[in-house]
Amino acid sequence: MSVASAWVFCGAARLPVPRADAFQPPARLDPIADLDTALEQALAQPLGALPLHRLAQGASTVAITVPDASRPCPSPVVLRHLLDELRMAGVPDDRICIAIGCGLHAITTAAGKERLVGRDVCHHFAVVDAHGIESPTVALGSTSRGAPIHVVRSVADAALTISVGVVEPHLYAGFSGGVKGVAIGCAGQATIAWTHRPAFVSLAGVRLGELRDNPFSEALTEIAARTSLRWAVNLVVNERGQVAGLAAGDPALVQEALAAAHARAWRREVDAAFDVLVAGVPAPKSAGFYQASRAATYVALAARPALAEGGMLVLCADLPDGAGDGPAERNFLGVLAAAASPSDLVARGLHEPLGPGGQRAFVVARVLERCRIGVVGATDPAFLAPLERLGVTAFDSVDAAVAATEARLARRARVLAVADAMTTSVRAFGRDEPQGTTG
């Protein structure tokens, strides 16, 4: 029997999935009623750290890192409270820098900076991009596994660094937030390339939703330890863009606390694997295929995939930016388009560099080794045409993708709709765990 109320995100819109046999709605995360009061309380009672106005006393320079547009973070509100704390500590405004953690994503425009940090902050403080290629970096040694530690100078030179971030499931780090905003968001290209290379992200323990005994997470901790990162404000945002949880203080403790508090809401189990899984991608992750493809990897590379081998993963995203605007996004699409086959790309990625964003092409190829990807809702799907021979097909509707699967299977397909596949980790109950996955 179909679930009449099933739907999935497609950017800001919601697409009905009338053929769904099962439906996983977004995590039910109630918003915080008064965000300002909650921030005041969190800053007054930080986890494992001094209050910021005490910690920052005597700091000659302070860097505050915030996410770029790929994370739905209410940074302007958080910054207002952090800047008040720094004024209480006696830090002059002209000694404070706001760094937007771009990683290898696109640099931000002047208007983009105003949206990310607020107009008043832009006009009164130094607001810079921390970009792995475009920004000057400082070499800070290497990790115990040999990762080169390069951090953008605006952060590396600061006497104190504070990170603002969002905690949500992450394919490699287990969860975003914590030290990641500095260790990756403000890292140089050499650091990002080393930590994201396919051989590293394929190691045992590199898993979605796992922080402990995770080599990727451990590497980020070592990278951040070479910087002055000592304090963080992390938030959990629900599907409506409302803050549903927050914590402040020691970056690792803040991340762990929020992950533990919300992990159960993000994790779901279904009774068996489905022939079609319709994966919703909300904004802002829906803007480009690079970010939206995370939903495909979260689903198909899970420890116990809820999508049957050879099935169809329908990715619902509007993709107004095509693959995406940054160097990582452009190379990601180029690497995929040049691949002879998914298996060839996987084999090549394990033995040679794939360039910025190549790790995402690698994990998408791993997805395509076990299932097909259908894309529904793309503003202009023409850019996906070179990927069709790999198993990526643009469809006009979810129904068309389901019909194509049923024609191939010569039977009725069982369909699962996951409203928000970016934060809902779905696994098939009791299925054996595939070997060598990162999901």
Image (tube, rainbow, N blue to C red):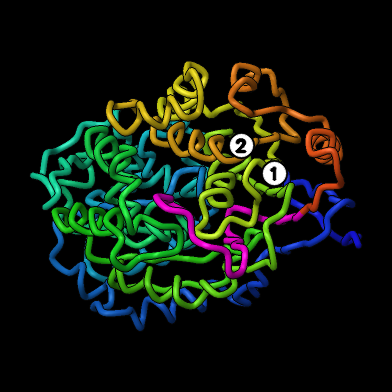
| Image side of residue 146 versus residue 252, left or right | left
Three-letter amino acid code at the position of disc 2: Ala
Residue 141 visible, this orientation: yes
**Residue 383 occupies which quadrant of the picture?**
top right
In the rendered image of this protein, does residue 360 appear above or below residue 227?
Answer: above
The x and y percentages for residue 9 are 73, 50
Q: Nearer the viewer, residue 81 or 200?
A: 200
**Residue 270 occupies which quadrant of the picture?**
bottom right
| Image side of residue 162 versus residue 223, left or right | right
The x and y percentages for residue 328 are 41, 29
- From the image, tell me which residue sits under label 2: 287
The CA distance from mark 1 to mark 2 is 7 Å
Is residue 432 part of the magenta span, yes or no? yes
**CB within 8 Å, label 1 to label 2:** yes
Residue at the extreme left of the image, as rendered: 141
- From the image, tell me which residue sits under label 1: 11
The x and y percentages for residue 337 are 52, 19
Q: Main secondary structure of the magenta part?
A: loop
Q: Residue at x 35, y 46 (%)?
A: 202
Q: Residue at x 58, y 47 (%)?
A: 295
Question: For the magenta stretch, what is the residue range?
Answer: 416-439
